[in-house]
Amino acid sequence: MSLWRHFTRGLRTLVHRRSADRDIADEVESYLEQAAAAHRESGLAPEDARRAALLEMGNATSIREQVREYGWENKIGGLFADLRHAARRLCRKPGFTSAGLLTLTLGIGATSAIFSVIHGVLLKPLPFRQSEQIVGLRHTAPGINIPDLNMAASLYFVYKDESRVFQDVALWSEDGVTVTGAGNAEEVPSLTVTSRFLRVLGVQPVIGRAFNPSDEDPGSEQAVILSDGYWKSHFGADPSVLARPLVMDGSPVHVVGVLPPAFEFMDRTPSLLVARRMNRQDIRLISFCCQGIARLKPGVTLDQANADVARMLAIAPARFPVNHGFSADSWATARIAPRLRFLKDVLIGDMGKTLWLLMGTVSIVLLIACANVANLLLVRAAGRQQELAIRAALGAGWGRIAGELLIESLLLAMAACFLGLALAYGAVRTLTASGMAHLPRLHDIAIDPTVVVFTVSISLCSILLFGLIPVLKYARPRSGDFSNALYSGGRSLSQSKEQARSRNVLVVLQVALAVVLLAGAGLMIRTFRALSRVDPGFSDARHVETLRISIPETQVKDDERAIRLEEEILRRIEAIGGVSAAALANFYPMESNTNDPVYSENPASASSSKVPPIRRYKYVSPGYFSAIGTRLLVGRDLTWSETYNRRAVALVSENMARELWGSPRAALGKRIRPGLKDDWREVIGVVADLHDDGVDQKAPTIVYWPLLLKNFEGSETYAIRSVAIVVHTPRAGSAGLLQDLRNAVASVNPDVPVANVTTLQSVYDHSLARTSFALVLLVISGGMALLLSVIGLYGVISYSASQRTREIGIRLALGAQLPGVTWMFVRHGLVLSAIGAVWGLAGGFALTRLMKSQLYEVSPADPLTYLCVSAGLMLASALASYLPARMAATVDPVTTLRGE
Amino acid sequence: MPEQNTDVIQGTLDLLILKTLSLEPMHGFGLTRRIEQTSRGVFKVNPGSLLTALQRLERNGWLDAEWRQTENSRRAKIYSLTKSGRKQLERETADWSRRASAIARLLKAEA
């Protein structure tokens, strides 16, 4: 308590210094008066009384000083005075202050912004209980060339029964369901999950219950759990919602619970969780359908879990029969192996590398900014050298001088920290609002206390970087140095070699770092150009709108009627003004995919019974290729009558035709089928390759099947009931078109909802998002680095020129030519930047290797990039040196010499 | 005749102030005079030390200070003992008597 009292009183004294001083003075004065009064009482004359009192008391001023010195606040009072002085000095030099502040703010703000992204996306744990125990059950199958494989229903049962490392296992898949009943039919996002899904995540419904094992039984009533948002928007947050009816995909379902408000899973906010129902005896071995997650037992490592999964993968074939039409050894030939990853890593994917790359980038920018400010401070300290020397000569300790120099840096850094935080806040807001980066966990990115602490720490660290350099230069305890400074502090002597050296070193450092960043930016530009030159396999994407409809069996039982309904919707859409083509596919390009083996009548592969390579399956309507602008190389497109007659035909992609038969033309008339028991299908056409996994990925080999099929993958009849409609029209992306499309669909069947409306262009942009995000930030950083280092160079050359005006005057007076004198300075600048560039190139070669995963068809050691960067930098340096040199050299020699 | 030492014994100024103020509140000069009178001139208090000590004691919460009119109608800062000041006085008095009697015993000791 007493401590607190000391603190608050001291603080009050600090803040009201003047009134505290007055109080002390008053008290001393009153003491004097009382003493004088006492003397008067004892009979002295008033004047004598006062003199006597004064004599007794001693020096009033020294008493005031003595009393005033009491208290902790007076120990740090000097610091505050220094702070005030430093602030005043900074305000008196607005040019220096704003340059330093701006530079530092940019550096600190950029670093803080990227850190907040890294913190939100990579570092924060997922919002689940002990989320570090949750893993994604990924696999790999090198035997059939699938690096990343999802999860099978058969494996779900095996892992559930046999595992030694998992507490709980669950399957999930993303879905959309049609909810009818109240009002219009609506397509809502849902997750289809097995019974222990919420238990794996450690989430408890706020109303009702989680799914239980009996909900997985196909004989039970379909159970669903509502999201908090859906419960509030569609049921008015009715607490008795569990008794209310809900019709999903045409059949009534049972609401068993409501999720907590903040529920979000893998960046998805489904409106419904739907219980996955399956009969164990219907499940075949190869049933890769879904995503899998599991919660590890406490203390189990990922390696232990992988080992246990490997053990269970080996026993799976004993538990489930091989699929119809697959050879018995197909499981073994696929060589399926575990590839478990923490759920967070599954969610973040390869964004981590990009983000760390950007973090490195902005750190370099911050370093350059620090070097720049250090240079500014050096110039300032050089200007104050004489003053500092005088103070040292008068007895100021070097610690005191160092403190004063540091305080200026401290003020600058703290102001920059504050402004940098504001900048970071703005940048993060812009980034999350634009959605340009397609970052995972976007909602988790914010300027939170951790980010603030980080920002303050890097600001303090940056002081050490830029503030200590002038301190070490000018406030070192060195005997004899100060007197030297006293003599040379005037203008008579040229700048000392040593001062020039530290500034030169800083400029070389800046240039080197800038070269590294520019090389990175250059490589990203080259990558982006290479990616934009890739033909994605479709064209005029800006004018292709896509939307999704689905016709569930509960609405239209007959397969052919469902497809005819889809065609009718297509016809209505084609009739909309401005629509030049419309077609259907199970997935539009880059949307989603299914892969399965394809048997071909190729003499080479017919002989062996082993499973042929996996191909991408796509199901399309006639006119699909022309609607999205995919070139038909040879052969012909499908027809509607072929589709309805379930003719056994198919198209293949060019790379598949070349792989199997040597050329697109040779593919025509060849026969393929998905399984050994299925009908053979004739290849009637070959279309251009499609980069279905993203522009930066290899184009997969694709088979295009009709929407309606018979004897296909073991089924007698097979129809695509959930289709993406692609519409080619100049009105793509407009609200008017969307309304027309909704009307067209509703005019055929009002119970069919329209979902997932987007344009092919935005799908294409999305696939480039990671690259463009890295590109934009690297180019901005590179530009900032270039600007800062050029400014740094300019500063050094112009300072050295201003110090050497007398020398220039003498040279000119002795007959030196103007270009020669100018060249002297330009050469100085060029030498500095050349040294910097060499170091930068070396550093670039070393560091850009780290960004290999971000590059596409460009080597990290791309000679063109390095050549351009070096040339551009030398050009900029030449200009930055020429301008001040020119200015210095145009002085009139007479004026300069007389000025001495 | 050598000049007699009138310095306050080091570390006892606080005790003297607290004890004097426990009798009645008074201002700085009043304290000086009272200590001088009561000690019969053995101790003379240096005003600088006194005012600093008053600051310290007030900071510690043992004294209250207030600008008031004095009997001779001048303004002065009047100090008074607080409750915790009274406790501190007890502590310091006990401490002092313990030490003083120890010193007395030591001085009286004979070989």
Image (cartoon, rainbow, N blue to C red):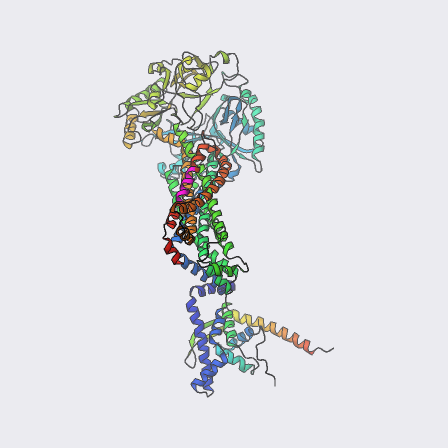
Q: Is the residue A399 above or below the residue A204 in the image?
A: below
Q: Magenta-highlighted stretch: main secondary structure?
A: helix
- Viewer-nearest residue: A704 or A81: A81
Find the residue positioned furthest to the right: B111
Q: Position of residue A585 (x, y in %)?
A: 37, 22
Q: Position of residue A486 (x, y in %)?
A: 48, 61
The residue positioned 43% from the left and 85% from the top of the image is A46
Q: Is the residue A52 above or below the residue A891 in the image?
A: below
Q: Position of residue A554 (x, y in %)?
A: 37, 23
The residue positioned 44% from the left and 80% from the top of the image is A33
Q: Quadrant of the C terminus of chain A?
A: bottom left
On screen, residue B106 versus residue A335, left or right, reads right
Q: Is the residue A642 above or below the residue A825 in the image?
A: above
On screen, residue A655 versus residue A327, left or right, reads left
Quarter of the image for residue A706 reads top left
Quarter of the image for residue A650 reads top left
- Viewer-nearest residue: A656 or A138: A656
Residue A123 appearing in the image: yes
Read off the magenta span: A871-880
Find the residue positioned furthest to the left: A577
Residue A399 appearing in the image: no
On screen, residue A738 versus residue A274, left or right, reads left
Q: Is residue A247 magenta?
A: no
Q: Position of residue B57 (x, y in %)?
A: 51, 70
- Viewer-nearest residue: A133 or A193: A133
Q: Is the residue A443 above or below the residue B69 in the image?
A: above
Find the residue positioned furthest to the bottom: A43
The residue positioned 58% from the left and 31% from the top of the image is A164
